[in-house]
Amino acid sequence: MLGKLDWSAIPFDQPIPLIAGGVVLAAILAVLIWVVVKGHLPYLWHEWITSVDHKRIGVMYILLASVMLLRGGSDAIMMRIQQAVAYQSQGYLPPEHYNQIFSAHGTIMIFFVAMPFVIGLMNLVVPLQLGVRDVAFPTLNSVGFWLTATGALLVNLSLVIGEFARTGWLAFPPLSELSYSPGVGVDYYAWSLQISGVGTLVAGINLVTTVLKLRTKGMNYLRMPMFCWTTLASNLLIVAAFPILTATLAMLLLDRYLGFHFFTNEAGGNVMMFMNLIWAWGHPEVYILVLPAFGVYSEVVSTFSSKPLFGYRSMVLATMAICIISFMVWLHHFFTMGAGPDVNAIFGIASMIIAVPTGVKIYNWLFTMYGGRIRFATPMLWSVGFMVTFIIGGLTGVLVAVPPADFMLHNSMFLVAHFHNVIIGGVLFAAFAGFEYWFPKAFGFRLDERWGKVGFWFTFVGFWVTFMPLYIAGMLGMTRRMQHYDVAEWRPWMLVAAFGMLLLTIGVLAQITQLVVSIRNREALRDRTGDPWDGRSLEWATSSPPPVFNFAFYPDVRGEDPYWALKQHAKEQQLGDHSEPEYQDIEMPRNSPTGFVCAFFATVMGFALIWHIWWMVILGGVGAFATFVVFAWRDHDEYVIPAAEVERIDRLNIEERRDLVSLAGTL
Amino acid sequence: MAMTATLEQAHADPHHIGRVSENPGPAPKRIVTAYGFWIFLLSDIVMFSCFFAAYAVLSGQTAGGPKGSEIFDQRNVAIETVCLLFSSFTCGMASIAADVRNRLWFYLGMAVTCVLGLIFLAIEFNEFADLVARGYGPSRSAFLTAFFSLVGCHGLHVSAGVLWLLTMMAQVFAKGFRADVLRRMMCFALFWHALDIIWVGVFSVVYLLGGGT
């Protein structure tokens, strides 16, 4: 009846996950009760859960990523403490639990923090920057988000029901095969990634179509803001790479569920094939994450230097070059697995070549700042901090791209420090920069600068104190994923790293404080004009938060930095705008619970597959198909906002902006 | 300020790349939908390519089990291919009928497409059942694993296609040739033709290359 599920699945003998799960469950229940008692449930349902508005979906993506960041961060704290105390002792985490923690940490941080964060930013910003009203497929957008949330939910369920994978974040066979991992851990891993991977693919298709087919009048390719270019590149990579992940996980699942022999040791299975397939997805994946990050920095540096981006076309070229080359370097993740010196040399050189376009980007940002009127607001601090940090990560990347060096450094702490260096210093800093930068656009008030700066400095310093010692420990021969160790000279570095983790934790707490303080002082921090930073691209040309239709008229773009040009033009003419525009009715897509219902059935189906509850699997599948049919049967998928209403909303914003024109360029 | 404000050419061409044609604005829905679906199909083809690659790597790993030439029945494969390729033609007929709003020919074309798809699936199912009965199931060897997965993945797609086809017929029956129904029909046709292209690959790589003695 319940497949493999029984009471033994709950880890009553392990206090840590049980307490953690209990706390989380209590928090969720408290929030739910508060929502219901306060009567917020209808509002949540109508305005958020069933919303197909790209701005709302973007915000929900970022909320999901932030919550999961706390979960993945807790894992990181536990690991740092374990390695600090586990010198010539077992520490406080038993091996099987420690292995689950590092696997969950990697999986969560990549799939449920970094991915939703950048996809959330893209969703929120790209349609606004392109001057259009929504993404290409609004309802599909909602489905994609909720499927991602389903994946996150399943991973978190594994905390208290059953176990998570102990195989590392990519579940290499043969360890992840049934004979070595008989439990449900790998199944949790594979099904949650499979479901959220579908969500990611959907988002990718959606955003590629949006950038290529929905641009406002005059928004030619070489007038798009840099963030739109990086979004395009990143989503092209999603469309090209994520199906590989889907296929690879499907093969692993077939091995585990039906006794196939793709990656087994017996009957002719081929483990190296898994390596090639997973990294053919895995390497593009890191560029899927970092390209939008580069886009965020381009926007921020240009805005806060009050200058157009330096070398715009070279930036476009560099972005697309990285997009293509990123598919040609996957083998550098397993130089030591016997491909031979000639193959290794080719892939080593290809990997080093990526440093060239990346260097082009760094110089472009520096030259954008050169001679600009720089304002060191929090987003700009994150961007400058990124440049300093990321260069170190990039250089160590070039170092491990040298195959002979990699034979020494493969799977050492040096490698761990390298990829944390580029992902934290690159992607996470960009996520925070974008969060600070676009928060006023999403919610209509700024974030508190003082707490933001405290958060930045603690995170920035904390990062260096945590990860530079790991470089050194790696050089001293420490390998990754060690539950305990006996080498005396590693110990001090582990203690320093644990202290750095403390600083990082304070940084995160400072940012949470910043959010709370800002919400409480929101009237003082109110952004009335929609243009708090003296911005340059179209998302600042509408109110904060933007109306559901974004723009009363499709903007008519005549060049780069279109909004900046508009402001300058208005300034020259000594006017706001006195012409009387002709407002028209606007058609917008209706809200739909399709995404939420789909994800509900996907959750049921995923859980049932993990625990082998076959009748429930069929139930979930039939439910999902029924949802699809019900959605296809709708007769009215749009509603009309009358011209008078559009005019009322737009007039308010125009009034607020009158004074802004005279201030352009002087902030 | 209004968004219709115009600008002099001062900002129009900062990089001196010459006169560029202006982007006319967002594309119409039909174009956007078809474009998005094309992108999806490309991603689906990438997924198939992984199974092709796996088949290429594992096709020699028979682990003492049968080789391809011992289990492939060329005559059945020929019938399957004829069915599927002809179903592409009838699907095209149904698409044309939908474009000219002709219900009779639409239903007829779709029905024939459906029957041909089902014949294809039946033959494939028989082939699989027969192999399993002889002890040559997918867990017998890595070669059979790859074979069942690649061919079965295509078969699953065809099954999903048949389900979608029936849904489309019901849609037209219930809603008539509405704009959104026509857009879905277009996507379905793209999907069905794409499966044909994949089948040509499967047929060549698996049955023709592996079928020789």
Image (cartoon, coloured by chain):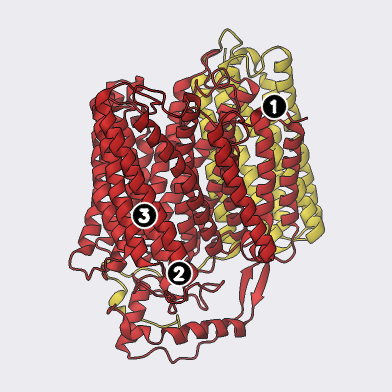
Q: How far apart are marks 2 and 3 (CA)?
A: 17 Å
Report the residue marked by disc 1: A4
Tell me the quarter of the picture where residue B159 sits: top right
**x and y, in percent, of residue A182 in the image:** 59, 21
Chain that is coloured red in the picture: A
First along the sequence among labels 3 and 1:
1
Quarter holding the C terminus of chain A?
Answer: bottom left
Please tell me which residue lies in front, A396 or B194: A396
Q: Is residue B114 above or below residue A533?
A: above
First along the sequence among labels 2 and 3:
3
Report the residue marked by disc 3: A430
Q: Mark 1 lies on which chain?
A: A
Disc 1 element: loop
Marks 2 and 3 on same chain:
yes
Q: Tell me, what hue is chain B?
A: yellow
Q: How far apart are marks 2 and 1 (CA)?
A: 48 Å
Q: Which chain carries label 2?
A: A
**x and y, in percent, of residue A303 in the image:** 31, 68
Camera-side mark, 2 or 1: 1
Kind of residue sitting beneath label 1: Lys
Residue pictured at 46% horizontal, 87% vertical = A655
Q: How many marks?
A: 3
Report the residue marked by disc 2: A441
Please tell me which residue lies in front, A416 or A458: A458
Around disc 3, counting alpha carbons within 10 Å, would you say few (fewer than 14), some (14 to 19), or many (20 or more)?
Answer: many
Kind of residue sitting beneath label 2: Lys
Kind of residue sitting beneath label 3: Ala
Tell me the quarter of the picture where residue B5 sits: bottom left
- The answer, for residue A198, to whether it is visible in the render is no
First along the sequence among labels 2 and 1:
1
Q: How far apart are marks 3 and 1 (CA)?
A: 43 Å
